[in-house]
Every structure is written in C-alpha cells, then in structure tokens.
Amino acid sequence: MKVIVLGSGVIGTTSAWHLAQAGHEVTVIDRQDSAGKETSYANAGEVSPGYSAPWAGPGVPVKAIKWLLMQHRPLVIRPNLDMAMIRWGLQMLRNCTAARYEVNKGRMVRLAEYSRDVLREMRAELGLAYDERSQGTLQLFRTQKQLDGTGADIEVLKRYGVRFELLDRAGCIRHEPALARVQDKFLGGLLLPGDETGDCFKFTQSLAARAAQAGVNFRYDTAIEGLLSEGGRISGVVTDRGTLSADAYLVAMGSYSPKLLAPLGIDIPVYPVKGYSITVPIIDASGAPESTVMDETHKVAVTRLGGRIRVGGTAELAGYTLQLHEARERTLKHVVTDLFPAGGDVAQAEFWCGLRPMTPDGTPVVGGTRLPNLYLATGHGTLGWTMAAGTGRLMADLISGRAPAIDMEGLTAERYPRAWRGATLRLAPTRSAAGWTATTPAPRAGAAASR
C-alpha cells in the first residue's frame, strides 16, 4: 500500500518508520529541509509516562489566575479575537473537573506507557544514540500544599501500575545530588523512576536516516497546500511541487493539522500553545541534574542531555506566532540558576520556541476519521516526544488493518462530535493556509539571547 505521511516531526517520522517496517511504500512530505525542525527541535527532552497528565484539572482555573500574576509565570495569554482560542479555552474549562481529569489522565498514561515500551524496543533494535538516560523524572515541590495535592495523581499511577516514590528532602538529594546545594528551596518530590530523557531532535534525525535507508521517500522543502477528495475518500495532496496521491494519508502536522482538515469539514480542537526552551552547556557536571527535575511551581523542566542542560516550559496562548519573548527566557534562566546554580553557563544559552499542538482534554487525536483512508496523529501537546514511538506503531497497525496493541477508546477524533460528524467532502483544496509558510525561529546564542 502507498502511504503519504504529512509532517516529519517525531510523530510523523516514527509513523513512517513503522509503516515501512509493515511493508508499505511510504512518502513523507515536510516544508523544512530535514526532519524534526519544528516543535521536535528543542523540547524539554522528557520521555515521561508517569508525568502524563492533562493541564485541565480541578482547581486549574483558580491556579491559572495566580500563574498569570507571577513574576516568572508559567502561563501567558496574549488576548486577541481568535475564536479558535476562545472555543478551545472554554472546552478546556469544561474538562477541569475531578471526573474528567481522571478519565483524561488514564487515557494519556495508557498511550504514554505503551510508547515508552516501544521506544525501548526501537532503541535496542536500532542502536540509536540521542543522549538518552533512564534515570526517571523528579517532580520537585517547593510548598507543602504541592506535596499534599499529589493524592489524585498517585491514585491514577497506582491504577495503571506506574512506579513512583514520594520523597522527602533527603530522598530528593539522594536522587539528584546537586540539589544539596539548594536544599532550602524545596520540601520534597515525586519520583517517577520509569521515565527517561533524550534529545528528541537527535532521535528524529537518526530515525529519519534509518527510515530513508529502509526505503521511505522524504520530500523536504515541500509546502503542503491542501487535500483533494473524490468518491468519499482522499485522492491527493496538493503541494507547491505538484500533486501526490496514495492509498492512505496520515496527517501529522502538529498545530497546523486543523488548518489542513478544516476545508474537509473535519473540526478538531487542536490549538497551538507556545513553549520555550533554553539549552546551556554544562560547566560543572556535579552541579547539573542527573536526569529531569520538574519544578512544580514554575512548570519548568530541567533536563540533562549529554553535555548540555535543556530547560523547557511556559504555556503561551498567542495563536501561531513564533516571536521569542525575552521575559520567557528570563524565567527559564531563573529556574535553572535557582536549582542548579553551578551547573551550566546561561550566558551561552540558546533560546528557542515551538508550537505544541494541544487538545482541551490533554489526550491526543490518534486514529482514523470518517474518510476511510484519512488518519490523524496530532494533538500530543507537551507529550509528543513521550508518546511518539507508540503513536507511530499504532498508526502502522491501524493503516495496515491490524488490531492495535492497546485500547483505542478515547484516543480518536470520535470523542469530538464536530470532528466525527463533519467530513464535508470538497473536490478541490483550499489554499488559505498562509500560516503554513511560517518557519521555526533559529536558536539565539550567547549575549544575543539575553537582549
């Protein structure tokens, strides 16, 4: 079967690999000059099944107000007349109940745990090197209230058999010795020992090279302009280099997926939530993190990637803009110097941002649509790297007509009535996707990053 994958981020590339392994003829289309150049480029580096949780939860609306008032705030909203943002926000608020949080977290953990296992299989099989470590994630609590609020998450972790340890201050220091230098800054933490870390961009580039060797055709520097449909099926992809056709089509375009699907009447509530990161060289290994430390107060992850520290965080609602705001850089620098003051040289920080494709319930949109040869793999939010390997194998199974290894309940577009019942077929593409021509901003290094 001929399959076209739209997007060469970590989701699209892992899907292409598994599809090729299933015997399909695979073509990947992307506007960048190589794989993983957009949201997969400089994310926080966590492969964190244990930390998989929706942003929408009990108490979040009140917390959001507090976050917006913080000096180093984890949430930024830049108001505009974007109806998609407003609708997405209202849907997120509806998911801020205990019952929905538990359901949504359960769905996310199910996919994330499966994906972590698939990633381990791929690493053993392919020998990929991407600055990987398997030393867990430490969720660090600065206040007693944060410690006391772990009960609901722990219950879900128990239900799904996810290993965890609730640590006091001394336990946190045993796991992350560098924290001994700042032990007055925190009270305890939740350790998720099954979590991993690694450079998502290195992984994606390496896997794309192996996929190309296995026969996958990567068509880079190619802008996707629309989808053609005929007879109740997708019949082609219109690009700036001509129209391509296949037997099946997989949309893995992250935040831009809704723009491509809208002309077909498929409405999925995936919205871009901008995240920022800095990458700094390690100057004192004993003062750097061993794995990932998640600062629960600022919602910032500090991760060791080889000889670098990656610091990622912030949720910014601002549409599709890729403008770098220096206040966000100051927050990231504050967290890493507050917790690991001797670890890295922030004067040499590379500053970056990317658009996370977020759903209002936190769960990605993975699976088929009402059009029998159109499939979706998007909406992974902050967990694209965590869920990528499993998502890719699931898509290969579904497109191949095989039963997936995990229960697909709650993962597909079927949970969104507007997406599932729409599917108004168009015989010509809509060329109104000017936003697709945006490019990822290059990282800024050194002094330039601080001005």
Image (spheres, rainbow, N blue to C red):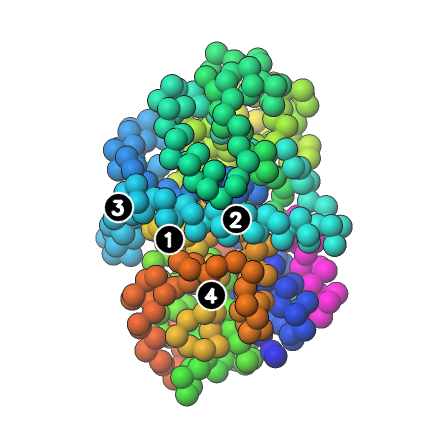
Between discs 1 and 2, the one toward the N terminus: 2
Q: Nearer the viewer, mark 3 or mark 4?
A: 4
Q: What stretch of residues is rendered in magenta?
A: 202-217
Circles 1 and 2 in contact, beta carbons < 8 Å: no
Count neighbours of disc 3 (C-alpha within 10 A) and say few if under 14, some if 14 to 19, many if 20 or more: some
Q: Position of residue 431 (x, y in %)?
A: 39, 73
How many angstroms separate mark 4 from mark 1 (CA)?
A: 15 Å
How many angstroms separate mark 3 from mark 4 (CA)?
A: 25 Å
How many angstroms separate mark 3 from mark 2 (CA)?
A: 24 Å
| Amino acid on which the number 3 mark rests in the picture | Leu
Q: Nearer the viewer, mark 1 or mark 2?
A: 2
Circle 4 residue: 367
Residue 112, numbered circle: 2
Asked if the stretch drawn in magenta spans residue 381, the answer is: no
Between discs 4 and 2, the one toward the N terminus: 2
Q: Position of residue 105 (x, y in %)?
A: 41, 45
- For label 2, the SS is helix
- For label 1, the SS is loop
Location of residue 226 (image quadrant): bottom left
Q: Is residue 127 left or right of residue 359?
A: right
Circle 1 residue: 359
| Amino acid on which the number 1 mark rests in the picture | Thr
Q: Position of residue 426 (x, y in %)?
A: 36, 81
> As rendered, which of 159 and 255 lies closer to the eye?
159
Q: Nearer the viewer, mark 3 or mark 2?
A: 2
Q: Residue at x 69, y 63 (%)?
A: 211
How many angstroms separate mark 4 from mark 2 (CA)?
A: 15 Å
| Amino acid on which the number 4 mark rests in the picture | Gly
Circle 3 residue: 93
Q: Nearer the viewer, mark 4 or mark 1?
A: 4
Q: Is residue 398 left or right of residue 359?
A: right
> As rendered, which of 6 and 363 lies closer to the eye?
363
